[in-house]
Image (tube, rainbow, N blue to C red):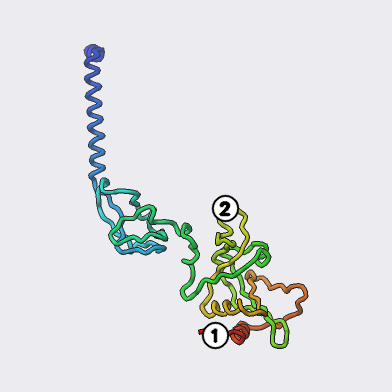
């Protein structure tokens, strides 16, 4: 112990020991960094070309082992948390064999007009003009269900009312500038269009009804009754088939 104290009391000896310790520490850390840089890591890559707006699934992903020094840019390395179930960006096509990069992969809700992805096969999106009043004080939200009602005047001058289609899901509510009314924003946005999807035959009927003077199409929340306006008498209740025939009989096909 006495000899150790004598050794430690020698400044030159302490300096030499300190220098040796620093060299050892640097050597250890250098080897760790070299091993990290040269050791292969497993990264995901695209086994097929993935088009924009496409959801990424397991079948589209392969894995390869590369060194960390080979990775350039914002490469995504964890398929489970960063890639699977995500979507390719609207301006990004991922070629077969390419790694996945941060800017090319986004969440579904980040897609412009992401609601278009949810349209059923065989259905077509329809933009329905609305006002604050016709949306019950802006109380119709994406995800709500509505019934599509028809109002028309018969050949005898009588008011006709009927339900053309029911349980239609609202996909989006937009203002006059095309912005989503209910997205997080400090702006107060008034509804101008409600977007929903319908089958092609209903879509065509709605388009034709837009040009008919004595026809009104009204959205009513599902399980809510259509309210008559002041001065309107008790109407004739008509079926959806009668509504279709009425609209078709007053429309002209243009080549």
Res 208 → quadrant:
bottom right
Q: Nearer the viewer, residue 152 or 228?
A: 152
Q: Are marks 1 and 2 in contact (CB under 8 Å)?
A: no
* Mark 1 residue element: loop
Residue drawn where x is 39% and y is 63% of the image? 52
* Mark 2 residue element: loop
Say whether residue 85 is visible.
Answer: no
Q: Mark 2 highlights which residue?
A: 185
For this orientation, the residue located farthest to the front is 255
Decide: is 79 above or below 236: above
Residue drawn where x is 26% and y is 45% of the image? 69
Q: Nearer the viewer, residue 178 or 138?
A: 178
Q: What percent of the width, then of the height, locates residue 145?
A: 59, 68
Q: What percent of the width, then of the height, locates residue 225?
A: 68, 73
Residue 232 appears left or right of 170 = right
Q: Mark 1 highlights which residue?
A: 253
Q: What percent of the width, then of the height, locates residue 158?
A: 73, 84
Classify 10 Å Cα crowding around label 2: few (below 14), some (14-19), many (20 and above): few
Residue 1 appears left or right of 235 = left
Q: What percent of the width, then of the height, locates residue 250?
A: 62, 85
């Amino acid at each position: 112990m006495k000899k150790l104290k004598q050794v430690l009391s020698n400044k030159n000896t302490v300096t030499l020991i300190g220098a040796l310790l620093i060299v050892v520490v640097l050597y250890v850390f250098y080897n760790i960094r070299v091993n990290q840089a040269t050791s292969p890591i497993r990264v995901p890559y695209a086994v097929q070309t993935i088009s924009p707006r496409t959801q990424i699934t397991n079948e589209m992903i392969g894995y390869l082992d590369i060194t960390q020094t080979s990775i350039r840019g914002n490469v995504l390395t964890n398929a489970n948390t960063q890639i699977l179930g995500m979507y390719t960006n609207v301006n990004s096509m991922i070629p077969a064999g390419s790694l996945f990069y941060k800017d090319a992969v986004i969440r579904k809700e980040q897609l412009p007009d992401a609601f278009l992805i949810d349209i059923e096969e065989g259905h077509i999106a329809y933009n329905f003009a609305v006002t604050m009043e016709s949306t019950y004080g802006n109380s119709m939200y994406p995800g709500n269900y509505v019934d599509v009602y028809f109002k028309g005047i018969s050949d005898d001058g009588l008011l006709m009312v009927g339900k053309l289609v029911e349980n239609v899901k609202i996909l989006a509510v937009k203002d006059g500038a095309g912005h989503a009314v209910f997205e997080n924003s400090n702006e107060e946005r008034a509804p101008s269009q409600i977007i929903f999807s319908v089958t092609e035959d209903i879509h065509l009927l709605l388009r034709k009804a837009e040009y008919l003077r004595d026809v009104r199409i009204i959205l009513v929340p599902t399980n809510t009754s259509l309210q008559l306006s002041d001065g309107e008498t008790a109407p004739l209740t008509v079926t959806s088939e009668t509504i279709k025939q009425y609209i078709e009989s007053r429309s002209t096909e243009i080549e």
